[in-house]
Structures are given as structure tokens and as C-alpha cells.
Image (tube, rainbow, N blue to C red):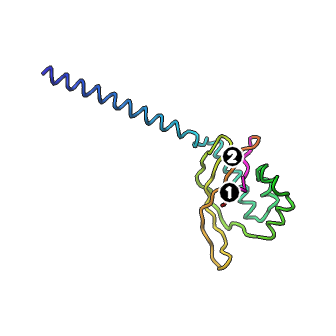
Amino acid sequence: MTRKIRVLIICGIVGIFSAIAVLLLLLILHSGNSASRVSLAEDLAVRQSAGGYLQAWQDQAPERMYAYLSRADRELVSQDEYQKHFEAFPVFPQHFKLGAIKLLAADKASLKVRVLWPEMSEEKMLDREEQLILVKENDVWRIREDESLN
């Protein structure tokens, strides 16, 4: 009987150590992914900026879209040039739905967006999943248009 008890105790100790090792491994893996998690406040801020930009685009208001652009994008094109580009190629989303956000860095995020685009050659719509890249500048999330919708 004592031999059986010793075997059971040893098996129990091995099992406990195995369970602890698995829990530690899961904790390490989970903490490694924390950089991609977004707080509720950041999620809301990203969605507000992206939604405002896309709504301005849907409303065909490039002057409002321009206000959502990152500093780097605004350095590439003036507001007047931006307006002219928009007028030369007047394609705008018919509908959009914001999806999952992934934090790429403390000041950079990607946001999946379902967009219904007009099909130029036919009279139908094209439903596509797009990605917007946003950067945080002075506590405000801005669209990185040069990296988005590619």
C-alpha cells in the first residue's frame, strides 16, 4: 500500500508541476501579444478618426478628409492639390463598416474596414475588405493614407 501511495504522490507532484509549467507558458504567450491589444479608449479614438475620414469621403468632402490625414501625408500634398485629385478621380465608398483594430505600435494601428465601392465598368457594387493605417500624433489618431487601402 505504501508503494502505491508513493507512486500516486509522485504522479500528483509531476502533474502539479506540469500544470504550473503550462500556465506559465500560456502567461508568457499572452503577455507577448499585449502589444497588439487596444484599450477601449484607444479603440474608440481610432474608430472615431477612421469613421470621420470615411464618412467625409462618402459625403464627397475632401476638405474634411484632409483634416484627418497624418502630418506625413499632408506634407506630400497641399489641401488644394488634394481637392484637385479628388475631383479628377471621384470614386467614393457607398457604404463602410469598421472592423477589427490591431495596435502595431504605441502610436500606430491598423483597422480592417468592409467597403462597398462602385464598380466603374458595370452598374454594380464591389464589396472589399480594406485596411486603414492610423498613426497617433499629439494624442490624435490620423489616417496614414499613403499606407492605407493598398
Report the side of 51 relative to 87 (left or right): left
At which x and y percent is residue 36?
Answer: 58, 43
129 magenta-colored: no
Asked if 143 appears above or below 136 in the picture, the reply is below
Q: Is residue 77 above or below residue 29?
A: below
Q: Which residues are magenta?
A: 139-146
The image quarter in which residue 150 lies: bottom right
| Above or below 2: residue 142 | below
> What amino acid type is highlighted by mark number 1?
Ser
Q: Give the x, y percent position of residue 64.
A: 80, 57
Q: Quadrant of residue 104?
A: top right
- Residue sitting nearer the eye, 56 or 17: 17
Q: Look at the picture and state if 78 lies above or below 15.
A: below
Q: Which residue is mark 2?
A: 45
Callout 2 secondary element:
helix
User: How many neighbours does mark 1 have within 10 angstroms: few (below 14), some (14-19), or many (20 or more)?
Assistant: some
Q: Which mark is residue 148?
A: 1
Q: Residue furthest front?
A: 76
